[in-house]
Amino acid sequence: MSKYDFKYLLQENGWLENVTVETDDNGIIKSINQLSSNSSENIGIPGFQNAHSHAFQYAMAGLAEYHPTTKSPDDFWSWRKSMYELALKIDPDQLEAIASMLYAEMVRHGYTHVAEFHYLHHDKKGKSFENIAEMGSRLIQAAKNAGINITLIPIFYQKGGFCKEATIEQRRFISNNIDAYMNLFEASKLLTLNKPHASIGFGIHSMRAVETENIIKVSNFRHDHIPFHIHVSEQIKEVEDSLHYLKARPVEWLSDNISLSKDYHLVHATHLVEKEINAIANSKANVVICPSTEGNLGDGIFPLRNYLSKNGNWSIGTDSHIGINPMEEIKLLDYGQRLTTNKRNTFSNLESGDSGFNALKTALQSGRKAMGNHHNSFFEIGKPLNAVVYSSEHPLLSSCSKKNLCNTLVFASDISMLKATIVNGNYIFNDGIHKNMGTIKHEFERALKVLEYR
Ligand SMILES: [Zn+2]
């Protein structure tokens, strides 16, 4: 049994004051009590949900910024070439080391859950490992090392593009047919059994990378709120190719051919037309927006303001991990809208004008769905305690009214205000220290040295 005191604790209906939360030995909340006063300086909000990650890409964060000095452009497709070079080098031990470091950094920034969109399946020659889900098992172990919850999404990656065979550089990603993918999925699912920190999801790399009949089959096979993730409409070229080969835009095709619902997570969905925006919002599906990566790759800006006018659901992800601060993701998302629409109230809605609260609430609730968790309450008896703790000692927070607290955290905080991250009832990060950082950092540096990558 453990006890946590908060000066303020954020619930789905607003702030509670002078709160004590008790958990059992498994980190499950047993009670939430409000007292007339307490001496705590802690401000608690729910742990962030990182709904889109490719862990191995953390090894190249910051390394793709030397651009050609000629006039030839550097874009998503040239970045992808560098990413493939890295993907071909990494062995299972190195993947575990890189992912452990990344996930520990996520915890330090307040994430308590990550959805890992995992497609680096095979050995360097493109052959299956003896355990076909070996690389997935390393990601689940990395999450354990780092003290974060993981939803492993083994990805179906079949082709090199619309009507294109996979290239030699893609050999580590490929499941040739639906049976190969389902075997991989089942082996990955087995890895999550009896592991409270792990769960499973279905994933299709993209419209261009899997035969459309197989996208439909995987969608039909999905059941029981297991989430379904897919990259979609990130690049204009992908939309043009889809129009050429399928006679429909990617989201248009998805909404016409599979039953989109609240279990579906469309990653990026950057380039949409009105009909597609309506289709996603009406189906209650979610978009996963990754503003720092989308900005870094020059993808484009998701039409959030329009989408929110239709009550669309969204969460955030850090994708290539060029940035891993959730508050920055939310701010970038908002500021992209402000800069392109000349309006400031991106997140306000008919119920509430509290921008910070509305953003935190949607990112949490859609983010949880990305993990297969459909609970809307922020903190609830019977559920694990996953929280980010800020210190009200900072002058902007110590002088802040409850009314402005969410907005101060979202729009005016920096990482130094984050005091602790509690995952499943344990302080994993506390007072500047991640409890396993020594070993994790050592293994990461060793792996990067062997890779001769940075
Ligand atoms: Zn991605």
Image (cartoon, grey):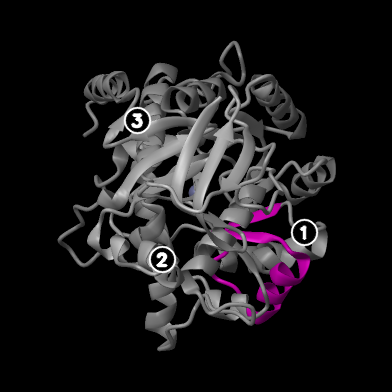
Mark 3 or 1: in front is 3
Q: Which residues are magenta?
A: 264-288
On the image, the x and y values in percent for residue 268 come to 53, 60
**CA gap, disc 3 and disc 1:** 35 Å
Question: Given contact means CB atoms under 8 Å apart, are the residues at marks 3 and 1 in contact?
Answer: no
Q: Which residue is mark 1?
A: 260
Mark 1 Cα-neighbour bin, 10 Å: few <14, some 14–19, many ≥20? many
Q: Which residue is mark 3?
A: 101
- Residue type for callout 3: Met
Residue 49 seen by the camera: no
Mark 2 Cα-neighbour bin, 10 Å: few <14, some 14–19, many ≥20? many
On the image, the x and y values in percent for residue 115 come to 56, 41
Residue 22 in which image quadrant: top right
Note whether ligand 1 is within 8 Å of mark 1: no
Q: Which residue is mark 2?
A: 405
- Residue type for callout 2: Leu
**Which residue lies at the image location 21% right of the left edge and 67% below the top edge?**
71
Asked whether 123 or 41 is in front, the reply is 41
**CA gap, disc 3 and disc 2:** 31 Å
Residue sitting at the far left: 69
